[in-house]
Each structure stands twice: as structure tokens, then as C-alpha cells.
């Protein structure tokens, strides 16, 4: 396993990303339908890159993996979050945190576009380990690729915000509408989180 991970890191660090093709945001509803129709099995839990104290749990499906943050030790936390990694949909993060004011801050982030992920993904997600997924997350972060995010409360604007770090993203208007409707509606947001959680099998 150690040799596999070292090879993986070496290949990722030299992988080239094409920035010439048009980037498309997959519809949120399409992603959720795919999650609903897939069963994800628990693999293991450990510290994920970027998290210093609380473990994330890895769940593996046929074409995607889900990382459930704040899953261990098992207790109540003021935040809940999931990271979905899929060759079809890219890397998508769902995050909710209860602020001291009582406001529930919610974010949906497409941190890696699917075509960028496919260019560097060199292992079968269905057979992935926590160590491999952890290194993938680290390398993607260090590559600082284009991303889009939608939030119900931006700290800089003190208002809802939807933005991308790149121009001319296809389907942006649809994604913006879908995500903002979900983030600002308690029922839609909680339904989304339940769909993800119900797909996970311990």
C-alpha cells in the first residue's frame, strides 16, 4: 500500500490540467439523484487533510466516494459536512455551521470541476482507501484549481453570494438558482442532507 500511495502522489504532482476547454457545472438535482440511487459502504475513518482534530468517515460507492466530516468521535457537533468525489460530477462540498448568533451558515462548493478531476484521477474510486482519497484531496487543494461556491451568508458581503473563480462557466445560472433555493430553504436543505446521509451504510 505504501508503494501504491507513493506512486499515486508522484503521478498526481506531475499531472497537467487543461484550461482550454469550456467548464460546465453539473446540475445539483442530477447529482442528488445519482446519490439517492447509489449505496455507499463504510470503509474507514481518519484525519483528512485540512482537518486537525476530528475524523472524517470514508464511504465508497461504485462510481463515487463520500467523506462525512465530524463523524468521529460520535457526538453532537455545531457543524455537519460532506465531500462527494465523482468523476462525473467533480468534487462537491456541502457544509452547514451554526454560528454563535444562531444563524445556520450553509455552503455548497464545487471545488473541482469534473473534467479537471478526470484528468488527474488515476485510481478506481470503488477500490479506494482513506489514504489514497486523502492524498487526492491534498493534491487538488495544492493545485488551486478553478472553483465555484454558493452560500446563504457571505462573511465579506453579509448576504447570500454565488461566485466562480473563472469566467464563462456553462450552466452557472441554473446552478446558482438551484443552490440558492436549497441553501435558503430549511426543508430543501435538510432534505438534501438526509438524502446524502441515507445513502451511507455503516
Image: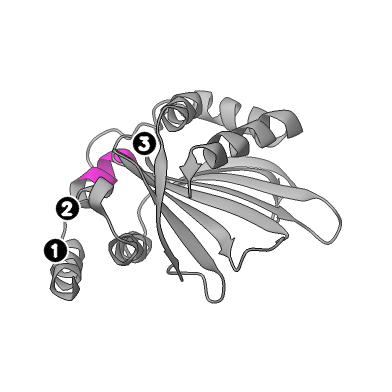
- Label 2 and label 1: CA atoms lie apart by 8 Å
- Which of disc 1 and disc 3 is earlier in sequence? 1
Of the pair 148 and 79, the residue shown nearer to us: 79
* x, y percent for residue 42: 42, 52
In the image, taking residue 18 as reference, residue 159 lies left or right, namely: right
Q: Which residues are magenta?
A: 111-118
- Which residue is at 56% across, 33% downward? 195
- Which residue is at 20% across, 52% downward? 120
Question: Tag on residue 37?
Answer: none
In the image, taking residue 174 as reference, residue 99 lies left or right, namely: right
> Do callouts 2 and 1 mark residues in contact (Cβ within 8 Å)?
yes
Question: Tag on residue 89?
Answer: 3
For disc 2, the marked residue is: 122
Q: Is disc 3 placed on a helix, strand or loop?
A: loop
Circle nearer the viewer, 2 or 1: 2
Residue 112 lies in the magenta stretch: yes
For disc 1, the marked residue is: 11
Classed neighbour count for the residue bearing mark 2: other residues with Cα under 10 Å, few (<14), some (14–19), many (≥20)? few
Amino acid at each position: 500500500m505504501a508503494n501504491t500511495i507513493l506512486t499515486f502522489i508522484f503521478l498526481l504532482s506531475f499531472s497537467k490540467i487543461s484550461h482550454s476547454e469550456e467548464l460546465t457545472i453539473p446540475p445539483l438535482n442530477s447529482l442528488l439523484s445519482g446519490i439517492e440511487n447509489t449505496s455507499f459502504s463504510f470503509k474507514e475513518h481518519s484525519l483528512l487533510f485540512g482537518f486537525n482534530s476530528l475524523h472524517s468517515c470514508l464511504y465508497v460507492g461504485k462510481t463515487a466516494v463520500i467523506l462525512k466530516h465530524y463523524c468521529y468521535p460520535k457526538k453532537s457537533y455545531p457543524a455537519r459536512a460532506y465531500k462527494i468525489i465523482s468523476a462525473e460530477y467533480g468534487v462537491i462540498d456541502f457544509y452547514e455551521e451554526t454560528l454563535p448568533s444562531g444563524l445556520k451558515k450553509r455552503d455548497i462548493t464545487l471545488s473541482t470541476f469534473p473534467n479537471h478531476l478526470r484528468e488527474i484521477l488515476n485510481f478506481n474510486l470503488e477500490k479506494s482507501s482513506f489514504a489514497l482519497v486523502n492524498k487526492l484531496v491534498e493534491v487538488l487543494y495544492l493545485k488551486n484549481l478553478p472553483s465555484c461556491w454558493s452560500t446563504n451568508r457571505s462573511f465579506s458581503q453579509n448576504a447570500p453570494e454565488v461566485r466562480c473563480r473563472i469566467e464563462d462557466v456553462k450552466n452557472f445560472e441554473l446552478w446558482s438558482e438551484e443552490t440558492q433555493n436549497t441553501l435558503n430553504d430549511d426543508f430543501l436543505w435538510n432534505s438534501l442532507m438526509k438524502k446524502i446521509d441515507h445513502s451511507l451504510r455503516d
